[in-house]
Image (cartoon, rainbow, N blue to C red):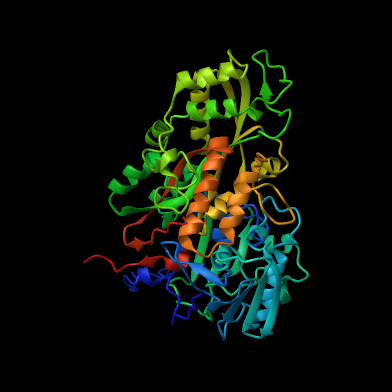
């Protein structure tokens, strides 16, 4: 196994555009509008891209991702496999937390262990650490991570786990992070203030170990409302926004003084189906009386739902082309892509035949739950899907909820049909498979976000075999098999892979990232045009 020891962190290398500032007293300040609702500032509470995006300004992982989702050293200078189940991480020296304490192996031991102990997590970060049996500090800058069996992807998994200060967090609850009291990291910014659901204020960490950004102060405004977010950019309230609403992309790009940048992401949007229970809470007959049996437990009904979806039309009309239709868990360039699954086109007649064969010749009613403020065009996508399902006889009501309510209720399995999204931050389809489709097992962290409770022994067997396979070709074949099994079972209904679009004032340059992150310290303000 290779030992990585580059001389510097590479994830900001693409940003070497210019560091000259325009004049003015606030030249070193920046205000950014983020699109997601933040459910917690605790970096180990809720495995949610919006939460992590904010936390990663204050905390660092051992291993980071560059803009193309390759892995690069962060707080770990390098890593090597010392045996089939032992990884050694060499830590970066002279790194200090925001309070001046040195970062050591004791903080790594504590942080990796803490992911498994945070209470009431809607989606646990233990997804990335459950295979870890124990972590041993050999000295202040050397850690051995012992796993329960071979885990070849462990360094990539650890890109999702941020390191916290043992001294600051050992006796802290999630609320201590939410208030800011425990927000002591090693990241490029220090916490300054928070106004819940509105804004987070940060200041430069002058002692940051990595490449210093331009900004002395950074203000993050939480702007989940699409029109508000665009208006904030065009009015000058913010300098940069993420997830430009699809209907506004062309207008922002054409507006003098503004520009857009985009990148294909790893976020798969999908429908989760409650197919495991004998009854499901939001399925009704046409007379609006609860159904005695769960229609989603029938493979033919799940197949009918998939056939009812016009993925091309969804992307073209609702997303203005800002996405790629997907009929499986991973795109053509990803490990595990199965070419034979391509071709899930809308088939209204076929869907109706399947419903009739399942005993629903006249259809039934169901409620589709979605977020109202979390994913791009989430409400519009849900309403469009409802119309598509209605065409085959599945009369669909839509309830769009604020993200904290949606995730809390979804975690309690209160829904029948859910519009969800999963950003495979690591860039690997294993992340989606482990979280969304693996058999739910709190002891191992598998299936942490499997809210449909899909379970397949064949899928789990292929996925687990892939997880311990060091050979890339064999791992790809195993992931392909897992993908085939889940899609033939319709364990979930893939819809599209999201394209991330950023909008900014002209001259404020953001590097588009495939993981969809908006990193303020990687934003560069160029010189004023002559």
Q: Is residue 479 left or right of residue 435?
A: left
Above or below, comparing residue 492 to residue 508 in the picture: above
How many labels were placed on the picture? 0
Relative height, residue 262 to residue 193 (above, below): above
From where the camera sits, is residue 447 visible? yes
Residue at (52% x, 49% y) in the render: 223
Give the x, y percent position of residue 342: 41, 38
Relative to residue 202, is residue 199 depicted above or below? above
Where residue 68 sits, quadrant-wise, is bottom left
Q: Which residue, as the protein is rendered here, is positioned at the far right?
A: 171
Residue 502 picture location, percent across and down: 40, 53
Among the 4 quarters of the image, the one containing residue 157 = bottom right
> Which of the two residues, 151 or 107, is positioned nearer the viewer here?
151
136 vs 24, nearest the viewer? 136
Q: Position of residue 296 (x, y in %)?
A: 64, 28
Residue 182 placement: quadrant: bottom right
Q: Quadrant of the C terminus?
A: bottom left
Residue beneath the point at 71% across and 73% down: 168
Residue 200 is at least partly visible in this image: no
Residue furthest to the left: 530
Residue 456 placed where, x, y %?
Answer: 64, 42
Residue, x 38% and y 72% (percent of image)? 13
């Amino acid at each position: 196994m290779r030992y990585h020891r580059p001389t510097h962190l590479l994830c900001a290398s693409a940003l070497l555009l210019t560091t000259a500032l325009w004049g003015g007293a606030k030249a070193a300040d920046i205000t950014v509008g983020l699109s997601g609702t933040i459910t917690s500032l605790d970096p180990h509470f809720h495995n949610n891209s919006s939460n992590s995006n904010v936390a990663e300004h204050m905390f660092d992982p051992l291993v980071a991702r560059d803009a193309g989702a390759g892995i690069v050293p962060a707080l770990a200078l390098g890593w090597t496999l010392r045996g089939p189940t032992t990884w050694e991480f060499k830590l970066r020296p002279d790194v200090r937390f925001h309070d001046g304490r040195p970062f050591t192996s004791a903080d790594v031991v504590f942080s990796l262990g803490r992911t498994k102990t945070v209470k009431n997590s809607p989606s646990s970060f233990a997804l990335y650490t459950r295979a870890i049996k124990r972590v041993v500090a050999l000295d202040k800058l050397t850690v051995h991570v012992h796993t329960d069996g071979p885990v070849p992807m462990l360094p990539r998994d650890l890109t999702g786990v941020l390191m916290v200060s043992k001294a600051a967090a050992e006796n802290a609850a999630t609320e201590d992070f939410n208030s800011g009291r425990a927000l002591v990291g090693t990241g490029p910014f220090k916490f300054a203030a928070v106004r819940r659901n509105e804004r987070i204020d940060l200041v430069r960490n002058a002692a940051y170990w990595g490449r210093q950004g331009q900004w002395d102060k950074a203000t993050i405004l939480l702007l989940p409302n699409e029109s508000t977010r665009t208006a904030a950019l065009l009015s000058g309230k913010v300098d940069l926004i993420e997830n430009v609403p699809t209907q506004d992309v062309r207008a922002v790009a054409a507006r003098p003084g503004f520009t857009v940048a985009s990148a294909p992401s790893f976020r798969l949007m999908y429908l989760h189906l409650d197919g495991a229970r004998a009854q499901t809470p939001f399925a009704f007959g046409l007379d609006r009386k609860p159904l005695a049996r769960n229609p989603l437990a029938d493979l033919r009904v799940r197949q009918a739902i998939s056939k009812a979806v016009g993925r091309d039309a969804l992307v073209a009309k609702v997303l203005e082309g800002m996405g790629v239709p997907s009929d499986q868990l991973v795109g053509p360039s990803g490990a595990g892509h199965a070419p034979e699954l391509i071709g899930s086109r809308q088939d209204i007649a076929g869907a109706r035949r399947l419903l009739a064969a399942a005993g629903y010749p006249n259809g039934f009613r169901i409620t589709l739950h979605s977020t109202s403020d979390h994913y791009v065009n989430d409400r519009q996508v849900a309403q469009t899907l409802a119309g598509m399902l209605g065409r085959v006889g599945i009369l669909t009501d839509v309830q769009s909820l604020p993200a904290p309510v949606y995730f809390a209720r979804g975690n309690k399995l209160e829904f029948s049909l859910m519009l969800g999204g999963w950003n495979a931050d690591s860039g690997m389809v294993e992340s989606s498979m482990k979280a969304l489709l693996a058999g739910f097992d709190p002891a191992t962290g598998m299936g942490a976000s499997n809210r449909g409770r899909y379970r397949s022994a064949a899928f789990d067997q292929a996925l687990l075999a892939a997880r311990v396979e060091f050979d890339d070709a064999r791992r790809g074949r195993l992931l392909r098999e897992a993908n085939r099994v889940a899609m033939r079972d319709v364990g979930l209904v893939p819809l599209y892979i999201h394209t991330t679009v950023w909008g900014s004032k002209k001259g404020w340059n953001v590097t588009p990232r495939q993981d969809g992150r908006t990193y303020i310290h990687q934003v560069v303000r160029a010189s004023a045009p002559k």
